[in-house]
Amino acid sequence: MVGHRAVEKRYTRPNEVYGQFNGTNAMEPLKNLIERAWEGLTEGWRELLTRGGGALTHFSTEGTRKDEVAQEFPHWSLLAAETWETALSVVIRLEVPGMNEDDLAIDIHGNILRIRGEKRSGAEQEGRRYHLSERAYGHFERSIPVPHGVDPDKAEVSYRDGVLTVILPKTDTLPPCGLTMSN
């Protein structure tokens, strides 16, 4: 084209512009802040996945009453557990708040403790408009490995304040003994 000159635009990065004014990289503090925030976020997710990966439980609304599924609830929730053993038993505790004893079924197959249940949303959903919905409802199943050598026939099971406790007596209750090395 005659009379028109091609204009070359040069795009500069923001830190180049700010650096021109004060001789330093003014974006560095912001960059460091974002990096620290990202590291904290990824560390939190990593811990959640490694320590609590088994707690992530799927809730199915299949077979649930129609009035309870009118509202779309989350399909995943955390059912946190802890297990420990003493000289005489293995103890498993599982947080399952908002339920009744009758809503839970507990059994042992081999070395797996299986907890199944149904968490109900309560009243009918008609006329409700949720602003926040983080609680999952429906049928669920959670499996927790237990060591071999427990007697499921003598298990003690209780549910109080939203925590299910299962105490499994050991079949071999000999206390640990010290061993000496020979020369």
Image (tube, grey):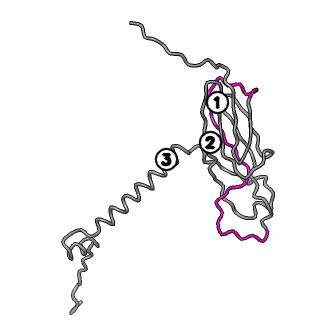
Left/right placement of residue 128 relative to residue 170 reads right
**What range is drawn magenta here?**
126-154
106 lies above or below 154: below
Q: Are marks 1 and 3 in contact (CB under 8 Å)?
A: no
Question: Mark 1: few, some, or many residues within 10 Å (few <14, many ≥20)?
Answer: many
Please state which amino acid type lies under the numbered disc 1. Val
Report helix, strand or loop for mark 2.
strand
Nearer to us in this view, 172 or 30: 172
Left/right placement of residue 16 relative to residue 52 reads left
Quarter of the view holding residue 53: top right
* Residue 107 percent across, percent down from the top left: 74, 34
Question: How far apart, in angstroms, are the residues tagged by discs 3 and 2?
Answer: 15 Å
Q: Please give the name of the residue rendered at 72% of the width and 64% of the height, measured from the top-left corner.
A: 71
Q: Which residue is mark 2?
A: 81
2 lies above or below 54: below
Question: Mark 3: few, some, or many residues within 10 Å (few <14, many ≥20)?
Answer: few
First in sequence: mark 1 vs mark 2 = 2
Q: Please give the name of the residue rendered at 69% of the width and 68% of the height, measured from the top-left corner.
A: 130
Please state which amino acid type lies under the numbered disc 3. Glu
Quadrant of the image containing the C terminus: top left
* Residue 139 percent across, percent down from the top left: 73, 49
Q: Main secondary structure of the magenta part?
A: loop
- Check residue 5 for magenta coloring: no
Question: How far apart, in angstroms, are the residues tagged by discs 1 and 2?
Answer: 13 Å
Please state which amino acid type lies under the numbered disc 2. Ala
- Check residue 144 for magenta coloring: yes
Q: Which residue is mark 3?
A: 47
First in sequence: mark 1 vs mark 3 = 3
Question: Mark 2: few, some, or many residues within 10 Å (few <14, many ≥20)?
Answer: some
Identify the disc placed on residue 90. 1
